[in-house]
Every structure is written in structure tokens, then in C-alpha cells.
Amino acid sequence: MHVVVLGGGYAGLTLTRELEKRVPTDANLELTLVNDSPDHLVQHELHRVLRRPELANAITVSLPSVLDRATVRVARVEAIDRERQTIRLSDGTLSYDIAAVCLGAQTATHGLEGVREHAIPFKRLTDAFAVRTRAREALREHDEPQFVVCGAGLSGIQVAGELAALVRERHGSNATAVPSVTLLEQLDTVAPQFDSHFQRAVTAALESAGVTVRTGTAVTRVTPSAVGLESDEQLPAECVVWTGGIRGTDALGRERPTVGPALELDERTFLLGDAARMADAEGEAVPASAQSAIQAAQALAPTIAHLASEDRDASEERNRNSGEKPVLASTSVNFAFDSPGWVVSVGDDAVAQVGSSVLTGRGARLLKIGVRLRYLAAIGATDRAAVLAREEVNHRLPFEFDRES
Ligand SMILES: Cc1cc2nc3c(=O)[nH]c(=O)nc-3n(C[C@H](O)[C@H](O)[C@H](O)COP(=O)(O)OP(=O)(O)OC[C@H]3O[C@@H](n4cnc5c(N)ncnc54)[C@H](O)[C@@H]3O)c2cc1C
């Protein structure tokens, strides 16, 4: 049986590693992971590269180094033909018995004028370096450069916090220098998919970091020097970051199809992570996040492992000979998202929600460090976890103790 996992992000890498663990080595399993880069990017730490470019290596994990039995194929997925069970890649085709589509999402510009040309998205390392370069140029060339981040989801919040910290670092210890960073959100609150007490705590943390938070504010266009708002106001901006939404991958016609708890497009093709609009049994949307992508992969793995472990060659062969499509046992995936909480950084600060409690300050910062290290250890990137742990001890902890003792 050939199981193909498309995309080596949170969902794809977690699923592939789970299958390596769960399927007995003597089972008839061929496992292929297709990704457009040889590396897995720890996206939920990407914003940190804005101030600390040296962290780029620590959040880039070579896929072959953390996989054992799977073949890593570095290629771009161009189209999925579910009828023929084939995938068109940039360098050929691949046929599958079971496919799990974990291709993540692309940045949505909603067709707004100037966004593609003048704003920088924030999904890849190249994006983070582009923002860093533009921000530093702006700080060099203007006395009071204006930074605008559009979209106050998990990425926009953390990028705005990091830019504010970058501006403060530039002004040295001059605590009165107010960073000129504005975070725009068209909905009525930051972190729109999260609990209201988390939203309030995140807003407070952003504001105390010097970020101007403007909710209920829709962007209509971006020019080389300003962000145009629905109210006709022109917000001057030397550096605009666009985190204003996501769309589906080109390989799925730019759509994010909705999947329920079974995570299936059909009985042989599964869809999970940001590539899908995942909904729970009540039809409630699950937030697009690393956390939900990982949990969905963990929920799907036992079913695929079960199918792959069964000796179904004989029945498949029989069905093939009779010209019919082999029938797989009905699936039993029942994904129910259960979040233990959330933690975001806001510059050197952090806000965490654990159950119904909200933490800020040292407790939240330590939680964020824990999440970082636990994830890297969970995907087998213990060398990267060690680098980050060393870095936290050398740079963050003495700072924490100085500030709070
Ligand atoms: C700055 C930032 C901060 C964030 N903070 C948090 C946070 O604190 N908590 C949280 O839970 N989430 C956070 N997120 C969101 C989280 O990173 C995403 O929700 C998560 O990455 C989704 O996982 P995924 O596996 O679906 O997709 P991805 O991780 O995006 O993986 C998709 C993979 O598919 C590959 N790929 C894409 N298209 C193709 C193609 N056509 N062919 C081949 N390969 C392809 C990509 O290279 C990638 O490896 C943050 C995101 C950002 C950008």
C-alpha cells in the first residue's frame, strides 16, 4: 500500500512520524512525504527571526533527519486527481492508495489593490527576512518610521509585538520612545477566533508594548507609502506586513474545502491542517493553527495505520482484476479539537490562556519557551531544541531575572 503525505508542515510531519511509529515494519507500506522544500519550518516561531536572524537555523528542521522509513520527495504538488488516485508534481506524477493532503494555506490578498506589490506576507523565512530588511531600512532612513501590520490573528499579533520590540531596541534603553507600530483588524477584536478574556489580555499586552491596536478597521488598498482604510483615511507606512487572511493552495483550486471530524475528501483522500476548513461534530470551525493541525494528524494516524497494517493485497488484487476500485474499510477518524490553551509572544512578553485562566508576565513567557522546546523534541529535532534551550538560557533568562528581581 502506498501512502502519500502531501506537505511537510505541522500536519504532514506529525502524520508521517506517527505512521512510522504505528505501522509494523513488516507491513506492506510504502510511505512518501512530498514537500516543496527539504525542510520543515517551525512557523509559529517565525516572527522571532525579525529581531534574531540567527534563529532561522533553529526553526528549520531537515525532514530526512527526523524521518526513518518515509521517502522524502522534494517537489511541488500541482494537482490532485482523486478519480485516478494520482498526483501531478513539478517533476512527474505519483500514484497513491491513500493520500493525506496537508499543504497548508497561502496568504489571501482578497484582490485588494497594492497588497501584493507593496505589503509583505508572513509565512516563509524569506518573508521574515524581507520584513526585517525593510524595517531596518525604514529605521535608518526615517526619524519616525511607521509600521503597519494588517490582520490580528496569531501571526499578526506576534509580528506587531516583535516589530515594536525591534523599534525599542533601536532606540536603546530610551523607554519613552514610543514604537510607531499599528495593528489593523477588520473584525471587532484581535485574535477573533479566541476567548474574550484572551483577546483582552492580548490587546493590553500589545498596547503596553506601544502597538496601536485598531479593530473594526478595514483596509482597502496599499500604496508604496500608505495604507488606505475604508474610512478614506490614509495611514502613512514605510513597512506594511500583510497577515490579513488565508486561502487554499493552488493544488486545490485555491479553495479550503470544509471537512468534518472524518477529515476526508473521499475514502482514500484525507485533508487536514490549514489546507482545510476543519469543523467539529457540531459544525463549529476549528481555528487554523499549528495546534489543530497536529491534533488532526494525531487523530488520523491510527486509521491510516490500521488500513496500512491489514494484509489487503489479496482483496485489492481481486478487485483490480475484476476491474473495480478496491474498497477500503470504512474509516473511523473522529477528530475533536481540544485545546489545552494558547500562548502568544508580544515582543519579550507573552500572554497565555490555560483553561479559563489568562497568564501574562514570567509565567506566560516560560510557557511559551516550554511550547517551543516540547514541539521540537516531539518531532525528533532534539538538536534544534538544545540550540533553542541554550539560547533561551543565555539571552532570555538572565534578562527575565534582571527585570523582575
Ligand atoms: C508568525 C506566525 C505565528 C504563528 N503562531 C502560532 C501559534 O502561536 N500557535 C499556533 O497554533 N499556530 C500559530 N501559527 C499558525 C500555524 O503556523 C499554522 O496554522 C500551521 O503552520 C498550519 O499547519 P499545516 O501543517 O496545516 O501547514 P504548514 O505548516 O503551512 O505546512 C504546509 C507544508 O506544505 C508545503 N507546501 C505548501 N504548498 C505546497 C505544494 N504545492 N507542494 C509541496 N509542498 C507544499 C509547505 O512548504 C509546508 O511545508 C502561526 C503562524 C505564523 C505565520
Image (cartoon, rainbow, N blue to C red):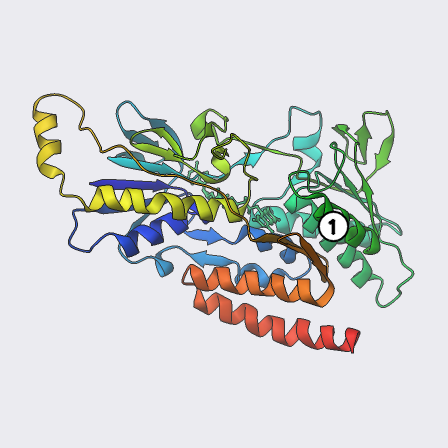
The image position of residue 168, as x and y in percent, is 81, 60
Q: Nearer the viewer, residue 329 or 30?
A: 329
Q: Splitting the image into 4 quarters, where does residue 223 fall? A: top right
Q: Secondary structure at mark 1?
A: helix
- Residue in view at x 68 percent, y 55 percent: 357
To which residue does mark 1 refer? Answer: 202
- The amino acid pointed to by label 1 is Val
- Residue in view at x 63 percent, y 57 percent: 49
Residue 66 showing in the rendered view: yes
Q: Splitting the image into 4 quarters, where does residue 209 fall? A: bottom right
Q: Quadrant of the C terminus?
A: bottom right
- In the figure, 55 relative to 355: above or below? below
Q: Quadrant of the N terminus?
A: top left
Q: Relative to residue 304, is residue 190 drawn left or right? A: right
- Asked if the beta carbon under badge 1 is closer than 8 A to the nearest atom of ligand 1, the reply is no
Q: Nearer the viewer, residue 174 or 28?
A: 28
- Residue in view at x 61 percent, y 63 percent: 367
For disc 1, the neighbor class at 10 Å (few under 14, some 14 to 19, many from 20) is many
The image position of residue 86, as x and y in percent, is 28, 30
Q: Relative to residue 288, is residue 306 drawn left or right? A: left
Q: Relative to residue 235, is residue 3 drawn left or right? A: left
Residue 345 showing in the rendered view: no
The image position of residue 5, as x and y in percent, is 34, 42
Q: Splitting the image into 4 quarters, where does residue 233 fall? A: top right
